[in-house]
Image (cartoon, rainbow, N blue to C red):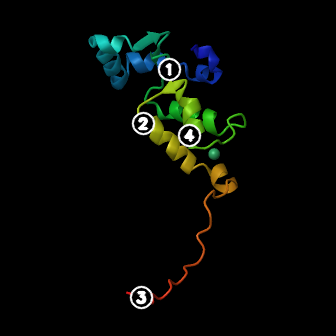
Amino acid sequence: MKQSSFPFLLQFHYWSPSYYKTDPHGQNLIATVNKDSSLTNKFQLKNDILYYQNKICIPSVQELRQAVLTKFHSTPVAGHLGFQPTLARLSSSFLWPGIYKDVNHLIKHCSVCQQSKYMTKKKQGLLQPLEIPTLV
Ligand SMILES: [Zn+2]
């Protein structure tokens, strides 16, 4: 996976070096990965981008996570797919703690989805009285 596969990430190039070198959370993450040899095999830092098993780890920068979520759900190419397809496409290339919750929240609060998607459940209808039993 190359960063150039996702050109929209280039606009956020300012955050990545500073996040892992100056942000306390980013520094802590890199220190933890370097201490534990079992984690070192799974995480790789290339060109100031952290990868976990060839998936780009998106740092805890809300603006960046929101941009990635938007690209994978709300653009015309993404097509406002449902929860499972959006999560599958997103998690094949990106990863962060709480990605499941963030995708769920985005889709539940997406105004386009709320206005244009229909209910897939049957209408419940009215309550019907039960028959009176003749035998006990
Ligand atoms: Zn949507």
Q: CA distance from mark 3 to mark 2?
A: 56 Å
Name the quadrant of the N terminus: top right
**Residue pointed to by mark 2:** 98
- Residue 32: horizontal and vertical position, in percent? 29, 17
Name the quadrant of the C terminus: bottom left
Q: Residues within 10 Å of mark 3 (few under 14, many from 20)?
A: few
Q: Is residue 68 visible?
A: no
The residue positioned 29% from the left and 10% from the top of the image is 37
Mark 4 residue element: helix
**Residue pointed to by mark 3:** 135
Mark 3 residue element: loop
Can you say whether 11 is above or below 35 in the image? Answer: below
Which of the two marks, 4 or 3, is nearer to us in this view? 3
- Residue 63: horizontal and vertical position, in percent? 52, 33
Q: Residues within 10 Å of mark 2 (few under 14, many from 20)?
A: few
**Residue pointed to by mark 4:** 84
Marked residue nearer the N-terminal end (4 or 3): 4
Q: CA distance from mark 2 to mark 1?
A: 15 Å
Amino acid type at mark 4: Gln
Can you say whether 85 is above or below 116 in the image? Answer: above
Which of the two marks, 2 or 4, is nearer to us in this view? 4
Residue 52: image quadrant is top left
